[in-house]
Image (spheres, rainbow, N blue to C red):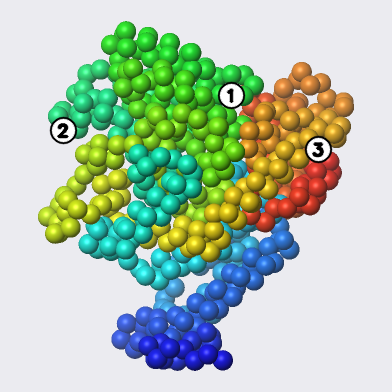
């Protein structure tokens, strides 16, 4: 066996977990000692690993009702410290059984929320380094690794070097940041004058009813009036924005004295994976200086595949794009990317320069606090760094291609079975399905909705698989969102059997 290098010798039991008695704790503060941490962390990592290995043995959705988990926890805080082993025991017996297992291969709900094990290592490393990201000086590596890794992903997704990126917690935050930047551009930096309330002209937001709920939320939070949010017409089948209608609405608003501020284009919408036509959107928006933000929260991962980039045509002419490696790509939450064409504008909108944060690095180093809302940041770049260095982009792309092929296969297969239909185009890895039993009138939307909600509920509560119900033109259907890291073709074969059983 190799001996640990001398510089690690004082760690003693390297790689050999052992239980450290409670009495070894720091007598004064009662805090966990490094040796106790080492032993408990080894046990925790073993436990996490075993859970991943055994994941298929557990139900996808736990059989719990609201309040069940809280009822098992003490209502008052623990009076004193306890052992890490007792916490792990409760994690196992109380907390874990209340988890919906989104890493389970039979999870087809919402969108994939993969947490590649390599990225979990990055999260652990981030926690272990425990650095404070409030300025370049407070953790130079935190800033510079983020700059480099975000640029790696830029290259992997085929974006030109005109883009600069930053990690946000979520695509919702990325959209809010874009709204704020657009608001200030459209209002000639109202915040430097009388603020939005004294601006005096309506500022307009353009999106579609298919856009994610976070878009409207961001618009309202950024101070846009609900009545100034325009829902542009969509194609009834693809649910993509109709750019002719966008051009028309912009003209009408300008004529009425309004200022068109931002268009949010969905590339891969949550409902049916709609792709708004960016080239035409940019053509309609650019004569008026309208900010174009691209919400590609889930679908952005597909930009890693050169053969799918045509879906993102026109992105180079947008102003910002947000997408989540923490969905399909597999970097553990919270790893959302926001790329901007003009970060200097964003910095002007977001910049703070309190005296206690000034340093000699000012003016030369990136200060990510000026690229978003929070001051303090975690070292989130390590999650991407670990995943890209250990799994590598080729393996990630291979998995995405597997999922695309699976979705195509599933869509072709499910319609061979009586009563099943695919109700929206399959643009990527999500297949929208509906079941109509032989004795049900397909023209009766209420009965159709009730039947589809019933089978989804029955399937999901069985714990054998999980899909998300969703409204399409006021009738319920189900989204089968393929893309969990562990999902192979035989899981989809099993899903079809289950769909037939429960419908
Ligand atoms: C298209 C789209 N946009 C935005 C979001 C919001 O993502 P986040 O949870 O990162 O805020 C989602 C979430 O699924 C989404 O599907």
Disc 3 versus disc 1: distance between alpha carbons? 24 Å
Task: Identify the residue shown where x is 41% and y is 87%.
Answer: 8
Asked which quadrant contains residue 467, the reply is top right
**Residue occupying image coordinates x 35% and y 87%:** 26
Q: Could you tell me which secondary element the residue under label 2 belongs to?
A: helix
Judged left or right of residue 343, residue 451 is right
The residues bearing labels 1 and 2 have C-alpha atoms spaced at a distance of 39 Å
Q: In whole angstroms, how far apart are the C-alphas of marks 2 and 3?
A: 58 Å
| Residue 148, x across and y down, in percent | 37, 55
Q: Does the residue labelled 1 lie within 8 Å of ligand 1?
A: no
Q: Earlier in the sequence, mark 2 or mark 3?
A: 2
Q: Which of marks 1 and 2 is nearer the N terminus?
A: 2
Provide the secondary structure element on which disc 3 rests. helix
* Earlier-in-chain disc, 3 versus 1: 1
Q: What element carries label 1?
A: loop
Query: Between 120 and 442, which is closer to the camera in this rendering?
Result: 120
Q: Residue at x 32, y 12 (%)?
A: 254
Query: Within 10 angstroms of label 3, few (less than 14), some, or many (20 or more) residues?
Result: some
User: In the rendered image, is residue 186 in sight?
Assistant: yes
**At which x and y percent is residue 336?**
44, 48
Q: Does residue 119 appear anywhere in the picture? A: no
Which of the labelled discs sits on residue 239, or is there none?
A: 1
Q: Residue at x 21, y 26 (%)?
A: 188
* Left-right relation of 443 to 187: right
Characterize the local packing of mark 2: few (<14), some (14-19) or many (20 or more) Cα atoms within 10 angstroms.
Answer: few
Do the numbered discs 3 and 1 sit on residues whose CB atoms are within 8 Å? no
Task: Using the image as rendered, state which of residue 159 and residue 46 is in the foreground.
Answer: 159
Residue 109 on image: x %, y %? 64, 45
Outermost residue, left side: 355
Q: Find residue 285 and report its image quarter.
A: top left
Query: Dot 3 corresponds to which residue?
Result: 413
């Amino acid at each position: 066996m190799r001996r640990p290098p001398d510089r690690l010798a004082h760690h003693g039991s390297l790689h050999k977990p052992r239980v450290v008695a409670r009495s070894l704790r720091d007598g004064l503060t009662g805090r966990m000692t490094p040796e106790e941490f080492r032993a408990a962390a080894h046990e925790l990592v073993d436990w996490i690993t075993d859970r991943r290995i055994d994941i298929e043995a557990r139900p996808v959705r736990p059989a719990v009702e609201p309040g069940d988990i809280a009822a098992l926890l003490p209502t008052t805080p623990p009076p004193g410290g306890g052992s890490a082993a007792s916490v792990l025991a409760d994690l196992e017996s109380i907390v874990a059984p209340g988890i919906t297992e989104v890493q389970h291969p039979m999870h087809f709900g919402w969108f994939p929320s993969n947490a590649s094990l390599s990225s979990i290592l990055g999260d652990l490393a981030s926690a272990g380094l425990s650095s404070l990201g409030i300025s370049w000086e407070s953790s130079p590596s935190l800033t510079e690794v983020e700059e480099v890794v975000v640029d790696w992903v830029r290259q992997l997704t085929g974006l030109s070097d005109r883009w600069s990126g930053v990690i946000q917690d979520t695509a919702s935050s990325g959209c809010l940041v874009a709204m704020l930047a657009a608001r200030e551009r459209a209002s000639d930096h109202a915040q430097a004058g009388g603020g939005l309330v004294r601006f005096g002209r309506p500022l307009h937001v353009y999106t579609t009813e298919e856009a994610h709920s976070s878009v409207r939320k961001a618009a309202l939070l950024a101070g846009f009036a609900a009545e100034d949010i325009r829902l542009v017409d969509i194609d009834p089948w693809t649910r993509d924005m109709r750019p002719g209608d966008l051009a028309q609405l912009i003209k009408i608003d300008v004529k009425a004295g309004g200022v068109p501020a931002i268009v949010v284009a969905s590339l891969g919408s949550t409902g049916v994976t709609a792709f708004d036509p960016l080239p035409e959107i940019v053509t309609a928006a650019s004569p008026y200086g309208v900010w174009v933000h691209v919400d590609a929260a889930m679908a952005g991962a597909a930009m890693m595949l050169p053969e799918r980039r045509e879906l993102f045509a026109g992105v180079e002419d947008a102003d910002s794009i947000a997408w989540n490696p923490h969905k399909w790509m597999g970097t553990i939450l919270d790893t959302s990317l926001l790329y901007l064409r003009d970060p200097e504008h964003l910095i002007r909108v977001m910049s703070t320069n309190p005296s206690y944060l000034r340093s000699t690095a000012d003016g030369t180093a990136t200060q990510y606090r000026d690229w978003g809302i929070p001051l303090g940041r975690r070292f989130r770049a390590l999650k991407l760094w670990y995943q890209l260095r250990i799994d590598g982009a080729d393996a990630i792309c291979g998995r995405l291609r597997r999922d695309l092929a699976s979705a195509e296969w599933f869509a072709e297969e499910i319609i061979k079975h009586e009563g099943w239909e695919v109700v929206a185009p399959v643009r990527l890895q999500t297949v929208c399905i509906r079941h109509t039993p032989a004795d049900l009138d397909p023209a009766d939307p209420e009965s159709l909705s009730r039947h589809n909600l019933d089978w989804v509920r029955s399937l999901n509560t069985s714990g054998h698989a999980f899909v998300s119900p969703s409204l399409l033109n006021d009738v319920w259907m189900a989204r089968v969102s393929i893309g969990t890291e562990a999902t192979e073709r035989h899981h989809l074969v099993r899903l079809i059997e289950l769909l037939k059983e429960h419908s």
